[in-house]
Image: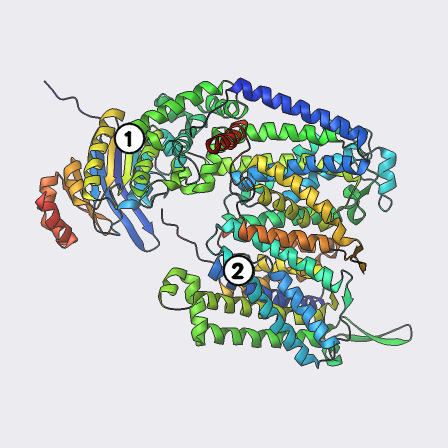
């Protein structure tokens, strides 16, 4: 039986990002397929988060293109891109600290009520056109027929919290959560935007080994239950080797290796870039 | 308009700009180390003038009175920091900002209560030679039986003194900032407060000294200002303070050279504009803000400011 | 102890009952109290509008706007110039005469309600123009820019003699503001702003307040939301300005009337009430008005233990601002903090009180 070819969710085409004289990312290329878990690794300062920032529209690339589900989205602002279906977490936790866990998720669903993006693209992906979106905004503010939508959003939020085993924190202020739960909330919040592509920036940072294992299971569960593609940056090699189906290695803004975990593990260029330390730990697993 | 008149406006503008620069540097130094807009700075300027006024009026020789004014302002600056700003070091920025506004109003009210709201004349406070006027060029004509000079450039002594004192003051400032340990600490804190604390420097003490220095500069500006516009009243610091802050922002907040450039630029533009378009003289105070908005629209970090790169 | 939620119907009934109760109190106040106190109650109402609208911008959206008094001034002048009759205008504009088109019948004797709305709309338009270039600026820059705009507005009013009568101001404005008008508008303000704040829009604003970069990445158009919140705040500031003009019956561009001092007064109200709480804003407005009037005594002559202490003018502001600084240092929270006074909160609070009594008894 022929295997169904998976569609390309994200295509990065000769992506280059320069800050003045510094090339943070140079000629980055990749095609991410639906349902993949792709890892992006490299020494500190290699340009990994910059790639994320370009994909999500925080920076406009100096050269190159970002294509999402076949559409060129290069240069669109972050709030458009989130509405299109790309969500991200942050390396330094950026939760809405004064709001409850539930409200953090609800805020991330707000984009469903306001217009983001050119009608042509919205129509292509079956989303509501701008005009209809605008109406939602006023209906929400004046509370006309809004209660149904609000209830649906709340239910969706609870479902996400349950998947991440966080429902007991629903009404706690985000700033009061323990560190591990805050990292999970980052992911939950990104999920609340209903993404097709999830960008995780060092989700295992600061976690002990048992927490990292739980994280790996969680990411697989999210990929399966929410039907998302995962692109993640990580330093913890156990997590990378155990979770990622494919790995790209960056150094000094450029790709130095790409492929399956086993190949990456023994690639001399990669070992050299990392100077061996973390590598030794990874080989044990 | 002929070249003489333009030159007159230019000189006046430069002199006003020097005063703005003196006040603006105080703002920018405090902002540089605390990221706080010290709204009360204009009131420190005002208090410095009042201190000087009362010192000299009570019999002190003028130079001692001026020193008292400067010292008083410096102490006031340190006191304000200790009482109101230090407790809020770790509070959200909005709280510190609102407190600064409160402090500004508090000082204005204090001045009204202590000194009375009626403006006092500053004439005769300074020795006569401050008020002598030098006249350059122009022509002597006869009008109604008397000889007067028209189309001349009038440079009051106070203006020359302003230039000289301002230059000396900034030279001293430069020496302090770049040739002393404390100055180096001030510059270091502006770059990275936490790291400096770890280096064993008493951050709070340096911050206090920064306030003292900035306030002293404002007081110098005030003393020169009173010589030029000899009227003192409690709310006199509000508009100049605001304009000086605008000047600091235009030049690039946090940058001392930016504050000087911004101040001088603002003074020049203000005087020359009013000179060219006297019918709009009533709007001259609004000019500073219009300039602010225009410049911030094109250079959000000010003319000489550095763009703050936020790590995402 | 679990928190009980009152169902919606109960809450609505309680609210309606409260409004009726307050209305009865006001009606009896108008009949029985002296006019000074009645005027004070109307003032509290319009202060409440100012505090609530500034809370939306400062507290909920996190934008330190110091230009509120400017929008208030626009609302005040616009509506006053519309409601005044031609003879009244001519009495004020003694120097320059009334400028066109204010000397027409169309733009005179306009009914108070419409004049107030137009005042609010004009203020909102100005806010849109002012806000557009300003929203991109970070906190401190926004503060100074909005303050600058408020000053520009004041200076324009000061100089545009044909339209605003410059430094002389407008005198003889009809005294339309009553308890009913000011508290009626306060009710509308609370309903509208309250509705916005509790909706998804309010959540988006608070998200922007907490972390604009994260908010952007979660799909929120930060610029548009901030601008909208700013404009809404300005509209109600304009409405309050109109009410103030018709309460004071004479307005001028002095900083103490419609300038920085007024903005500072509003800041005091929202800080005391709790930055970020709408009910706190109203409470703060009430407290400010009461304190402000109560402190009048420090400005008048008092005899203490047989000693005559002369009143010092300006003492009131000194005490208020001193108090303000103390509150900021020791009690930044304010009365309500960020929480709202809702029926649920009150009910649970009362339950806790009685439960606690029972436990020990």
- Comparing B95 with B244, the one in front is B95
Q: Is residue C5 above or below residue B135?
A: above
Q: Which residue sits furthest right?
A: B145
- Comparing C196 with B90, the one in front is B90
Left or right relative to C240: residue A250: left
- The answer to which quarter of the image holds residue B79 is bottom right
The residue tagged 1 is A165
> In the image, residue B114 lies at what x, y percent?
72, 63
> In the image, residue B134 lies at what x, y percent?
73, 78
> In the image, residue B312 lies at what x, y percent?
36, 46
Instruction: State the separation of the CA atoms marked 1 and 2.
Output: 52 Å
Left or right relative to A152: residue C62: right
Q: Residue at x 42, y 54 (%)?
A: B308
- What coloring was used for the rendering? rainbow
Can see residue B4?
no
The answer to the question of whether label 1 and label 2 lie on touching residues, with beta carbons closer than 8 A, is no
**Dot 1: what SS?**
loop
- Comparing A182 with B18, the one in front is A182
Q: Is residue A252 above or below residue B65?
A: above
The residue tagged 2 is B251
- Evaluate whether label 1 is on the same chain as label 2: no
């Amino acid at each position: 039986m022929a295997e169904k070819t998976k569609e390309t969710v994200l295509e990065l085409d000769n992506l280059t990002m320069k800050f003045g004289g510094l090339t943070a990312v140079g000629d980055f290329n990749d095609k991410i397929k639906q349902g993949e878990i792709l890892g992006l690794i490299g020494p500190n300062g290699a340009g990994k988060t910059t790639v994320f920032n370009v994909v999500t529209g925080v920076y406009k690339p100096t050269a190159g293109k970002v294509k999402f589900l076949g559409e060129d989205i290069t240069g669109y602002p972050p709030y458009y891109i989130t509405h299109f279906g790309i969500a991200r977490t942050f390396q330094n936790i950026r939760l809405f600290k004064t709001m409850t866990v539930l409200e953090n998720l609800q805020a991330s669903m707000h984009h469903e009520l306001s217009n983001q993006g050119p009608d042509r693209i919205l129509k292509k992906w079956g989303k509501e056109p701008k005009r209809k979106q605008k109406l939602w905004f006023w209906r929400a503010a004046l509370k006309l027929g809004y209660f149904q939508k609000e209830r649906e959003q709340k239910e969706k939020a609870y479902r996400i919290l349950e998947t991440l085993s966080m429902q007991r924190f629903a009404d706690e202020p985000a700033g009061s959560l323990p560190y591990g739960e805050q990292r999970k909330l980052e992911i939950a919040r990104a999920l609340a935007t209903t993404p097709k592509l999830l960008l995780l920036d060092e989700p295992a940072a600061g976690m002990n080994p048992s927490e990292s294992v739980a994280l790996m299971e969680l990411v697989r569960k999210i990929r399966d239950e929410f039907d998302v593609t995962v692109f993640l940056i990580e330093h913890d090699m156990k997590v990378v080797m155990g979770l990622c189906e494919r790995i790209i290695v960056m150094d000094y803004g450029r790709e130095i290796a790409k492929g399956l975990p086993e190949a990456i593990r023994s690639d001399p260029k990669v070992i050299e870039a990392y100077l061996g330390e973390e590598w030794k730990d990874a080989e044990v697993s | 308009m002929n070249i003489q008149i333009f030159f007159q406006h230019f000189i006046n503008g430069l002199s006003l700009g020097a005063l703005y620069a003196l006040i603006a540097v105080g703002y920018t130094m405090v902002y540089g180390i605390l990221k706080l807009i010290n709204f009360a700075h204009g009131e420190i300027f005002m208090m410095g003038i009042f201190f000087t006024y009362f010192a000299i009026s009570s019999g002190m020789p003028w130079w001692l009175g001026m020193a008292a004014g400067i010292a008083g302002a410096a102490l006031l600056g340190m006191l304000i920091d200790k009482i109101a700003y230090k407790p809020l070091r770790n509070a959200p920025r909005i709280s510190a900002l609102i407190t600064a506004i409160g402090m500004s109003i508090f000082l204005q009210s204090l001045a009204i209560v202590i000194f009375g709201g009626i403006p006092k004349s500053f004439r005769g406070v300074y020795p006569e030679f401050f008020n002598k006027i030098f006249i350059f060029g122009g022509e002597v004509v006869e009008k109604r039986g008397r000889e007067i000079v028209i189309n001349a450039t009038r440079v009051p002594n106070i203006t020359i003194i302003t230039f000289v004192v301002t230059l000396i003051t900034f030279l001293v400032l430069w020496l302090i900032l770049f040739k002393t340990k404390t100055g180096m600490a001030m510059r270091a804190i502006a770059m990275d407060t936490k790291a400096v604390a770890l280096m064993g420097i008493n951050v709070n003490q340096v911050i206090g000294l920064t306030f003292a220095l900035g306030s002293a500069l404002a007081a110098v500006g005030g003393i020169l200002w009173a010589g030029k516009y000899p009227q003192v009243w409690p709310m006199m610091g509000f508009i100049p303070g605001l304009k000086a802050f605008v000047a600091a922002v235009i030049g690039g907040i946090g940058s001392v050279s930016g504050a000087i450039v911004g101040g001088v630029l603002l003074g020049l533009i203000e005087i020359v504009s009013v000179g060219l378009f006297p019918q709009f003289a009533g709007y001259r105070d609004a000019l500073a803000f219009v300039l602010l908005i225009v410049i911030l629209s094109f250079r959000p970090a000010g003319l000489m400011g550095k763009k703050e790169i936020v790590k995402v | 102890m679990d928190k009980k939620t009152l169902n919606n119907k109960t809450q609505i009934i309680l609210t309606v009952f409260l409004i009726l109760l307050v209305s009865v109190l006001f009606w009896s106040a108008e009949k029985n109290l002296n006019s000074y106190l009645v005027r004070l109650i109307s003032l509290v109402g319009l202060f409440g509008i100012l505090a609530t609208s500034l809370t939306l911008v400062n507290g909920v959206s996190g934008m330190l706007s110091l230009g509120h008094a400017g929008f208030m001034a626009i609302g005040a002048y616009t509506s006053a110039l519309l409601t005044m009759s031609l003879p009244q205008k001519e009495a004020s504009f003694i120097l320059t005469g009334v400028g066109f088109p204010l000397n027409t019948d169309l733009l005179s004797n306009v009914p108070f309600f419409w004049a107030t709305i137009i005042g609010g709309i004009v203020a909102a338009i100005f806010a849109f123009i002012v806000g557009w270039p300003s929203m991109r600026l970070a906190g401190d820059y926004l503060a100074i820019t909005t303050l600058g705009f408020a000053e520009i507005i004041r200076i324009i009013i000061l100089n545009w003699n044909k339209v605003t009568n410059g430094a002389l101001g407008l005198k003889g404005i009809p005294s339309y503001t009553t308890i009913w008008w000011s508290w009626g508008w306060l009710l509308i303000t609370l309903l509208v702003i309250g509705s916005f704040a509790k909706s998804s829009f309010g959540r988006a604003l608070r998200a922007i307040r907490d972390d604009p970069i994260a908010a952007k990445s979660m799909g929120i158009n930060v610029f548009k939301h901030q601008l909208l919140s700013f404009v809404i705040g300005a509209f109600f500031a304009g409405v309050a300005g109109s009410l103030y003009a018709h309460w004071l019956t004479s307005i001028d561009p002095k900083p103490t009337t419609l300038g920085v001092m007024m903005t500072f007064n509003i800041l005091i109200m929202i800080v005391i009430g709790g930055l970020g709480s709408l009910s706190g804003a109203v409470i703060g407005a009430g407290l400010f008005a009461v304190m402000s009037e109560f402190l009048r005594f420090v400005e008048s002559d008092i005899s203490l233990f047989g000693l005559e202490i002369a009143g010092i003018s300006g003492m009131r502001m000194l005490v208020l601002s001193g108090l303000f600084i103390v509150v900021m240092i020791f009690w930044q929270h304010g009365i309500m903090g960020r929480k709202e006074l809702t029926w649920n909160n009150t009910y649970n609070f009362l339950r806790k009180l009685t439960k606690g009594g029972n436990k020990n008894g």
